[in-house]
Image: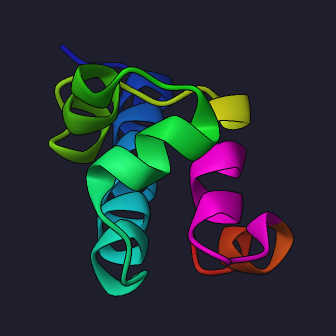
Amino acid sequence: MVSPDKSAGKQLHEGLASLLAATVSNSGKTRIEIARQTSLHKDALRRILTRERAASLAEASHILNACGVDPHQAASAL
């Protein structure tokens, strides 16, 4: 049985991944450009955007900044 904490964590991960994917998609920048600006390997960025792995808070903040989005405002969307 999945504990409520794990379920909430999964929902947060899914929400953050969706937010990041939409932000990157709407940024007008390529994933390569964003990976370079965030110092993330392009494959790490791909895995984050496809929900294969969770982004750390620092990574999410860097991705949002690279896309021109204020992380504090984006957090309210979650």
Residue 52 quadrant: top left
Q: Is residue 42 visible?
A: yes
How many discs appear?
0
13 relative to 29, above or below: above
Looking at the image, the residue that sits furthest to the right is 72
Q: Is residue 60 visible?
A: no
Q: Is residue 10 left or right of residue 65?
A: left
Image quarter hosting the C terminus: bottom right
| Magenta: main secondary structure | helix
Residue 26 percent location from the top left of the image: 34, 86
Residue 28 quadrant: bottom left
8 magenta-colored? no
17 relative to 45, above or below: below
Q: What residue is at 21 percent from the left and 29 percent from the top?
A: 47
Q: What residue is at 27 percent from the left and 75 percent from the top?
A: 25
Residue 27 percent location from the top left of the image: 43, 81
Looking at the image, the residue that sits furthest to the top is 1
Q: Report the front residue among 44 and 74.
A: 44
18 relative to 32, above or below: below
62 magenta-colored? yes
32 relative to 56, above or below: below
Residue 74 percent location from the top left of the image: 67, 75
Q: Report the front residue among 17 and 43.
A: 43
The way the protein has been coloured in the rendering is rainbow
Residue 43 percent location from the top left of the image: 22, 23
Q: What residue is at 29 percent from the left and 53 percent from the top?
A: 31
Q: What residue is at 43 percent from the left and 74 percent from the top?
A: 23
Q: Report the front residue among 77 and 24.
A: 24
* Residue stretch rendered in magenta on the structure: 61-71
Image quarter hosting the N terminus: top left
Residue 29 quadrant: bottom left
Q: Is residue 71 left or right of residue 31?
A: right
